[in-house]
Image: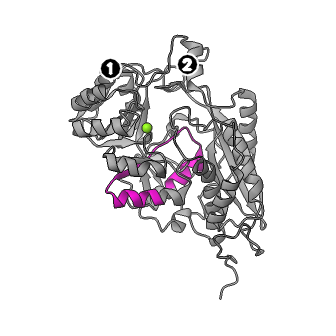
Amino acid sequence: MSTSGPDVTISTLTPRATATHRAIITEVTVTPVAFADPPLLNSVGVHEPFALRAIVVVRTADGVYGLGETYGDEAHVTRLNRAAALLIGADAFNINQISALVAESLLEDQGLGGHGTGGMVTTTSLQDRVLSAFDVAALDIQGKILGVPVSTLLGGAVRDEVAFSGYLFYKWAGHPGQSPDAWGGAVDPAGIVAQARKMVNDYGFTALKLKGGVFEPEIEAATIEALREAFPEMPLRIDPNGVWTVQTAIKVGKRLEPVLEYLEDPCLSIADNAAVRAAVNLPIATNMCVVSFNDVPPAIAAGAVDIVLSDHHFWGGLRRSQGLASIAETFKLGLSMHSNSHLGISFAAMIQLAAATKNIDYACDTHWPWKLASDDVIVPGVLEIKDGSVKVPTKPGLGVELDEEALERMHQQYLKCGLTKRDDTTYMQSIQPDFQLTTPRW
Ligand SMILES: [Mg+2]
């Protein structure tokens, strides 16, 4: 028997691992960071000049470290720190144990509020949101100890590269008071077509998604039609983040039936999306009305959606996301991935998960092109979008390395920027005082 492998204790319900082995967690740090974000418009306002993330670094007795990345809102960071304190002494191979300790850390959670997703995802599971970054970090450690990539731990890679869609946003040329960014403005169909050309030229995307819910549906439908004219073969999607009424969604959906690959969250509720789906001959996708395991039975019963856009940040990490993939397979739902503004650790986790998930049926979403290449906490050069896809890292664990100096620099940026939670609406109202948060709006 080999002595070089880990001495793993197979335990599922013990509150603490007692064996001394290489995967015992001895230190967990949670570091909020900020990175520059362009003024991307959405239904709840506009992205602020900085996006926030929390970087989780879990270290073991033998000096192996694992990385996780999640939302950077203050309340979420507080919860992460409470969980981190309980994880000392736990076994990085025992995710059931880590999950139980996260649950324990959330017992006294009154009044914290806030969930870090900018008001758009309201019924996600608190425990799954907190667990996610620790699950990813634990898998990173496991992979490093065993000498295999996370995709192997998740059952084995079924693909060498993962396809992503070009994520188009209506946007201003720059934040008020700042010079225009490299992308320039896009506040009409021609602007979005120009942005799409740059996306496709720079990254080779073979599918395009438009973030809608910003302008009158008539303008947004015309934008999709302009994209179709410019890119006759390209799969196209639009996501108004649930701000259309059923009536509007049916009208726009019927108009775009010949054009769209799928329609994402036309309305907010399961019932309303079911009504749209019954009337429109388009697949309906969601990352808003099916956002936790609790949402799955009613959504399936109502026939609300065709495609679930998973997101390991709120589905409880990579293993729980695989559980969702099995449900999608069982109920013949399509599956792809949702994205928030993120850094390289999240990207690596998404890629490892997608690599090991048979039924990823569509190019996944990513905000990757919207951040500066210099703004990251990982050593650069591993994750590159080429021909619309990213090669799956094959090094042990997630396949990315922490850049300690960059982590410190981006933490200082967090302290300096003054933001402590994502709030697109208040920022928009500081620029356009008459902006109202209304759902549905049209
Ligand atoms: Mg969405």
- Element type at mark 1: helix
The answer to whether 68 is drawn above or below residue 40 in the figure is below
Q: Quadrant of the C terminus?
A: top left
Q: Which mark is residue 305?
A: none
Question: In the image, residue 366 lies at what x, y percent?
Answer: 48, 42
Quarter of the render that holds ligand 1 = top left
Determine whether, in the image, residue 151 is placed left or right of residue 11: left
Which residues fall within the magenta stretch? 323-351
Q: Secondary structure at mark 2?
A: helix
Q: Residue at x 35, y 43 (%)?
A: 206
Using the image as rendered, state which of residue 215 and residue 315 is in the foreground: 315
Task: Look at label 1 and name its amino acid.
Answer: Ile
Position in image of residue 126 (x %, y %): 60, 46
Is 322 placed above or below 285 here?
A: below
Quadrant in the picture for residue 10: bottom right
Q: Is residue 86 left or right of residue 177?
A: right
175 on left or right of 224: right
Q: Nearer the viewer, residue 15 or 22?
A: 15
Is residue 266 visible in this depiction of the protein? yes
Residue 347 lies within the magenta run:
yes
Q: Is residue 270 magenta?
A: no
Where residue 178 appears, as percent x and y from the top left, is 61, 17
Q: Specify the label residue 219 is tagged with.
A: 1
Question: Is the residue under label 2 in contact with that under label 1 (CB below 8 Å)?
Answer: no
Query: Which label sits on residue 428?
Result: 2
**Crowd band around label 2 with a 10 angstrom C-alpha radius: few (<14), some (14–19), many (20+):** many
What's the distance in space between the residues labelled 1 and 2, CA to CA? 20 Å
